[in-house]
Amino acid sequence: MRKTDLIQTVAKAANLSSREADDAVSSLFEQITNALARNESISLVGFGSFTPKKRAARTGKNPQTGETLHIPEKRQVQFKPSAKLRALVDQ
């Protein structure tokens, strides 16, 4: 499902115009993105939680040359599905 498909589904389910549904979906994504950028966790009951995690710096190896590389620390987002979502997907 793409964002446009999601917008159309939300529009039908909530009896909204495509424009209103687009605004709602875009606003939701923007708020989730902003919260994660502020290093805040997001918990959506019945769906799951998004948590920003810090990945420590480490050394790696270039597979072509065998050269040792320094891989810097970085932040990434972890998603943990709720038990309800896990049960639906596992069926």
Image: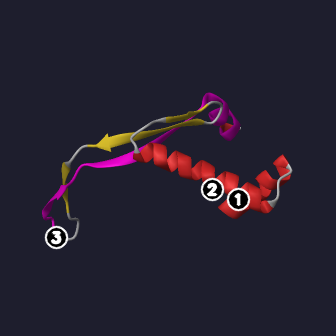
* Residue placed under numbered mark 1 in the picture: 22
Is 70 included in the stretch rendered in magenta? yes
Q: Identify the mark nearer the N-term, 3 or 1.
A: 1
Mark 1 lies on a secondary structure that is: helix
Q: Would residue 33 be seen by someone viewing this image from the given angle?
A: yes
Left or right: 54 as drawn, with respect to 17: left
- The residues bearing labels 2 and 1 have C-alpha atoms spaced at a distance of 6 Å
Q: Quick check: marks 2 and 1 in contact, CB under 8 Å?
A: yes
**Contact flag, marks 3 and 1 (Cβ < 8 Å):** no
The kind of residue tagged 3 is Thr
Amino acid marked by disc 2: Ser
Task: Report the side of 18 relative to 26 (left or right).
Answer: right
Rendered location of residue 56, percent (x, y): 24, 43
Identify which residue, 1 or 7, lies in the foreground.
7
Helix, strand or loop status at disc 3: loop
| Residue matched to label 3 | 65
Which residue is pictured at 21% across the width and 70% down the height?
64
